[in-house]
Image (cartoon, helix red, strand yellow):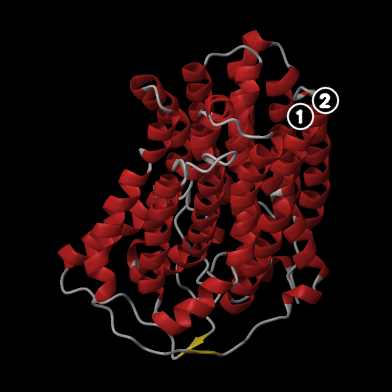
Amino acid sequence: MTEATNAEARKQRPGSPAGEAAPQAGVDPGALVDAEIDETPAPGPTRVGSRRQLAYLGLCLVLVGLNLRTVFSSFSAVLPEASSQAALPGWAVVVLTTVPVTLLGVFAPLAPVLARRFGAERVLLGAMAVLTAGLLLRPVDTGLPAAGHLPALLAGTAACGAAIALCNVLLPGLVKRDFPHRLGLMGGLYTTAICASAALGAGFTYPVYVATGEWTLALWFWAVPAAVVLLLFLPVAVRQPRIRHQAARDGVNVWRSAVAWQVTLFMVLQAMMSFSVFAWLAPILRERGVDGATAGLIVSVSIVLQMLGSLFAPALAAWLRDQRAINTVVALMTGAGFALSIFGPLELVWVWAGLLGLGQGSLTAVALTMIMLRTRDGHTAAHLSGMMQGVGYGLGSTGTLLVGQLHQATGSFTAAGFLFLVVGLLAAVFGYRAGRDRYIG
């Protein structure tokens, strides 16, 4: 395939009619892969009666996105208080920071199966119900001797991880299907809402703890917005018709593609760093002597800068002839920013957190953008997206696990700093290979 043909292919969305406009600059195209593209008959748009109801649907979908990361960042914001007051053993802290990320990969393949049977809207509603229930269950004290909060924390966190996995897979397809003429606006609002949810969890959980004096109330707080979205989305989901769909597989077998594995391993390494930021950056800063409110603010600002990186990185990646340079640079920025946040001079901690935020936001965005840039059609893109989410999140959860294990073994986070220097370097290597101008199949 000639370079001119490659460039032309990048201007069209996979699976789109020739000449259809690509998503607007600033929107991560990889985040808008339709997980239901293999269904037959093809699922139609969500049924709404007017433009006002369509706007209401858009609001609901954005609000769903605004609840998809608070579970990760809220617990880490009050981790020292929860660990001491609930007498959590070290292994439990590691599990609680690892399990939800692992379940993102475990439950991701189940989402299209459930959507074929019940419809994407109903599955999304059920996922929000499970998420709300999990957030309510997390801080419950069972009253059992030698158990206390631990059983509910484990069960609630697992429920949240499973629910978020379903939302991660189905929500982008709904945004793409229901707002084809507003894809730039809705895609931008949806992806920004997800980043904002992590920032809100990091920034507001500790102040709620200070105001109430209870870490349990600080965690319960995040069940309120989830319950509100559940009630708002309920009338939209229940009035959708029940249509049974069948799977009609098409596209390249991505599991046999070397390019697909390079992109997936790039995703694994970025996920190792991304979710470790949500789980451990606040505890790292607090162990270095930063007070809880300031640590939460630093994490929030870092995540806001992630939003800035994710806004511009996909457009730059798509504009370049290949993505080797940008993939390498943002991977090294992320690894260095994380390591310096752990053992760099504390007076420059805002600089390190800023470097980490810009790098991580750009890294996540370009890793997802590889879905579109390395595939020729929507079916292959959907299969690659499923592979990246299943393997990427499943193996990516080892990042939070390793940080916890290293901290338990050494009594400090210094070893984790060296770990992420290595992870950042490996991400740069696989990002370089994944960034070459080639297609899967």
**Percent position of residue 53, x then y:** 18, 66
Compared across the picture, whether 276 is left or right of 211 comes to right
The answer to whether mark 1 and mark 2 are in CB contact below 8 A is: yes
Q: Is residue 209 above or below residue 190?
A: above
Q: As rendered, which of 155 and 32 lies closer to the eye?
A: 155
Judge left or right: residue 193 versus residue 329: left
Residue at the image position 56 percent from the left and 73 percent from the top? 110
Which residue corresponds to the image point at 83% horizontal and 44% vertical from the top-left?
426
Foreground of the two, 373 or 137: 137
Locate residue 400 relative to residue 51 in the image: left or right.
Answer: right
**Residue 323 can be seen in this image:** no
The kind of secondary structure element at disc 2 is helix
Residue 68's place in the image compared with 412, above or below, is below
Task: Specify the amino acid type for callout 2.
Answer: Thr
Q: Nearer the viewer, residue 425 or 278?
A: 278
Label placed on residue 410: 2
Task: Tell me if I can see residue 330 in this picture.
Answer: yes
- Residue 62: x and y in percent read 35, 53
Crowd rating for badge 1 (residues with CA inside 10 Å; few <14, some 14–19, many 20+): some
* Image quadrant assignment for residue 395: bottom right
Which label sits on residue 231?
A: none
For residue 407, the mark is 1
